[in-house]
Every structure is written in C-alpha cells, then in structure tokens.
Amino acid sequence: MDIYNNRSAAEDIETIRAKMRQVMDDPDVAGILGHDFIEELKSWDAVVEKRSSEPFTLVILGEFKRGKSTIINALLGKELAPSNVSPETYTINEISYDPIPKVEAVLENGDRRMLTFRDITRDRLKIKMRLYPSKIAYLDIRDNAEILKEMRIVDTPGLSDLEDLDKQVTEYLVNADAIMYATSSLLPFSETEQVYLASHIQPQRFGMLYVLVNMMDALNTRQDVDKIMRRFTRISQEIVPNAFVYGISGIDEFMRKTGGQRPADKGTREFYETQFLKFELSLKRDIIMQKDVIRTKRVFTMVENMVGETYAKIRMFADMAEMDQKVLESKTRDFDSQCEQLAEALAECKPKLHLNIIEMQQEAEQWMYEFFAKLRQSMLECRQKDENGEDIFSPEDIEKYFYSYLMEKVGEAYRTCIECHRRRINQFVENISRDLARKLGLQDLSNVAQTADTGRIMRSMNTNVQRSVLSVKLFGTSETFPPAAMSMFSVILKKKQTTDIIDIALENYDEIRINIVNDIKNVYQDLEVKALQRLDSIYHHQAEVGKEALNQAKEVLVTFDGAKIGETLSRANSLVEECIDILEKYPD
C-alpha cells in the first residue's frame, strides 16, 4: 500500500503540525526568531489546515483566450463556466457538487448574492457588478455533474490581464492539488507562459500537471499537429518533467457531448478527439483514483517547506547566539567590508556582461540574416513553374497561405533566438553568482538568481520582439492587429495574380530585414539594462538579508541572556528535528 494513502500519514501530518505549533506558541522563540517569521509560520499552517479539510481542487490556469472555460464545459458535458468574457468581467469560478444546481456571487465583503445561470454571461454580469456594494471575489457554481462528486474545479482568469486578478490566481494556486494549464496551438508557448510554468508551477512540485494544447481543430494538417505537439512536449518536459501533454479541442468535445455543430474536420479530428479521451481517462486513473495520495503528498510538501525554513532559521540564530556583542559588532564590520567587496566584484563583472550581451546580439543578427536569405529563396520558389509552364502554387494557395507562412516563419525565427539566449542568460547569471560566492567566501548566491527574475528580463525582451514581428510595414500590421491595418492587407489579398503578393513582399524584403535587425539591437540594449539590474539585486539581496540577521541577533542579545537563548533554541530545535525524523519516512 502507498505509504501516503493510509491513516498513519494523516496522523504524522497532525503530529508535525502539533510540534510546530509548540514552536509558534512559545513567546521566547518568537522573541528570538522574530514575530514576523512566526506569523509566516502560522499562515503556512493555516494553508495546510485548509488543504487538509477542503475538497480536492483541480485548478485550470492559462493566459487569456486559451479556452479554459470551454475545456471545463467539455469535461462537464454542459455549459457551466462562463465563456466569451473580457478581462474586466472575468471572475474566478469555483465549480463544485450539489444535487441542486445553483450559482452565487461571493463578494469580497463576505456577502453572497444569488444569480441565475443566465446572469453569468459577459453583458449581464457586467451590469450586476455595477450594482453590488463590493467586488466579486468568486462565483460559487454548484452542479450535479458526476465528476464534481470527486473534485472541485476552479476556473481562473487569464494570467497577466489584470494585476489584482493575478494575485487572486496565485492564492488559488497555493491551495490547488493538481493543475491544468491551457495553451493554444495557434500561439505556440509564449515566453510569458514558459516563465509562469518555471517560476510558479515547477517550484511547487505538483504531483499532477496537465498541459492542454487547445484549439487543435484550427490546424490544417496532421503535419502541423505533429509539429506543434513536438514543440509543446519538448518545452514542457524541459520546465516540468512530470507534465502530461495533450493536444485537444475543447469546443469540438463540448459540441460532441452536447450535440451541437462541431468544427469542420480537416483530417485531424481523430487525433484531438482521442487525445481528449486519453486526458479524461488520465483524470479518472491518475487523479480521481489517486486523489487522497496526491493531496497527502501535496500537504507533506507544504509541511516540509515550513519545517525546513524553521530549522534553517534556528541554526542561524544558534550560531550567532554563541557570539557576544563585541564579536557581533566585529562580524557586522566584517560583513560591511564583505558587502563592499561584493559591490566591487559586481562592478568588475559588468563589462563582461556587456561583452556577453553584444556577442548574443551579433549572433542573433547573424541568425536573422541567414534566416532572411533562406526566406527570400523560399519566396522566389513560390513563383516557380512546372514543366508545362504552369504555376506550382495556385493564386488561391498564395492568397490563403502566403501571409500566414511569412508571419509563422519570422515568428519562429525570433522564438528560436529567444529560447536559446534565455537559457544562456540563466546560466550566465548563475555562473557569475557562483564565481562571486567562491571568491568572497560567501554562501552560494546562485539561489538568488531565480527564474522569475530572469523571466522578467525575457518578458521585456519578448515584448520588443513581438512588437517587431507584428509591425512589419509590408503587412500594415501593429502590435494588436487593428482592423484598419488588416483591411489594408485585405486589399492586397484581393489582387488575383500570383505574383502580386509575392512581388510586394520581395519589393519590401530589404526594408523588412533592416527593420527587424535594427529592432534586435534595441531588444538587446534593453536586455542589458535588465541584466545589470539583476546583478545589482544580487548585491542588495545579500546585503539586506545579512544586515537584517545581524541586527536582529544584536537585539536578541540585549533582550535575552546567552543561557536563555541557548535553552530556547535548543527546545525549539528538538521539536523541529523530531518533525524532520517523521518527514524522512516519506520520499519526495
């Protein structure tokens, strides 16, 4: 029997929590470790309590317009999750079991307002929101769908739409047992999606993560399907090795189950229909049947983090408690000197960083020149004729595919460049931090170089990249593809001769290439600024954490005598070590 799936595992969790509460409730421990830290532990314990008592929760995440609500409705076989909403009217939707279907708006002030299912449409919900005295915290949707007997499903707003919603989503993420991450086959894994997986999902060690590549019905050929799936699978495994990746069509599955008009079959329906079936089977086999084990492992992960943080804090103060005020003053002076050395060492690294960024910029420019040379050759090949003097590609093919072909190729070239350099930037920052740590005799600083921070650099870089790709003058497009610009391109498409569209592209070829290469320079200048800020943050983090610990230690020595500190920390340490002994029974 799985060691997580038994009564003793639950008893061990409660034993650990009881011992940790003894640590939290000890006023002397709070006085030494700091009241703020004790409050953090209490918040942690509250999350563990919540996870242990609430229904098993499956949360669906993803950026806006990835079809999250449609996927949920397809799972349930009925339209419960609101779809076709804007970021401003999007709510978090908790969908759980009740024999009698109903929906309530739970307001931030605690009030609950009854709604009808007709009310949770975009227009009607917008009107309701204006009438309420407080914002909607979430919609409490109840239904008698069979799968809801086993789990609660949480439908979240699109990530990176509104800052306050992002905060709410993060709070739900902490309380999730398993994750569905929705992506789109039409937008193949943006940088922000990859960064979110790396910085928010992967560190939390979820037992189950589904990456759902939605809208597969929009792809034209099985070759396109295979290409997209290879990309998503490769990137997912690099970030979260235990992720399950499925290529699905939420709308097709929803229509199939409800008897509606399904999207036209382009020869790929069998693939995404089968993939949705496999996804549902995995939900039943790997989540519903294993949900108690998954939840217990999830709680153990939280408890392990809480215990580990406490143990590290106790050991740090125990070491400092062995010093008197004079020694601590000396340590403070040494630390200040060490910080000065670190600042000087970082300053010495900056020219190296500059050269590294310049090399990446030149490499990117060279890649793009090579890419455009091949692209031009491909454009010329579109004008070739067969042995009978007929056009190889019909005017209809040119009208239908040429624009999307160029955009796909340019976008793919940029994404390849970014992905390569993102990995190199991560490694570069880690190497600098480790070199500094070795030279100055500091604790390894590489833990400061978190993916999320590097991700912010790359998000800024990617914004510039997308702006470049979408502002090519030939296509008359902009960052958001405004209707006026698209109508301009529609005029071009109305020309029936094969060479018209290709000739326009060839005539503007040099301008396109020059503009994009020039934009690369701006991208990497911005990248350098952000990377320098990242290096400076290493210094500030090290300095602030160290000074805070030393100052707190000096205050503790004034408040408590050495014997009291030793006795208190020894008592707390014994309790924490007992927790560690229990945790060692359970592998990661």
Image (cartoon, rainbow, N blue to C red):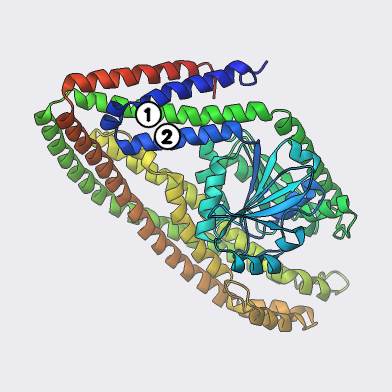
Residue 184 in sight here: no
Q: Which mark is first along the chain, 1 or 2? A: 1
Say which mark, if any, is on residue 527.
none
Dot 2 crowding, Cα within 10 Å, few <14, some 14–19, many 20+:
some
Name the one closer to the observer, 67 or 16: 16
- Residue that sits furthest to the right in the current view: 259
Helix, strand or loop status at disc 2: helix
Residue plotted at (53% across, 41% down): 174
Dot 1 crowding, Cα within 10 Å, few <14, some 14–19, many 20+:
many
Residue 363: x, y in percent?
A: 47, 57
Residue 112: x, y in percent?
A: 62, 54
Say which mark, if any, is on residue 24.
1
Helix, strand or loop status at disc 1: helix
Residue highlighted by disc 2: 42
How many badges with numbers are in the image?
A: 2
Mark 1 is on which residue type?
Met
Residue plotted at (52% across, 16% down): 585
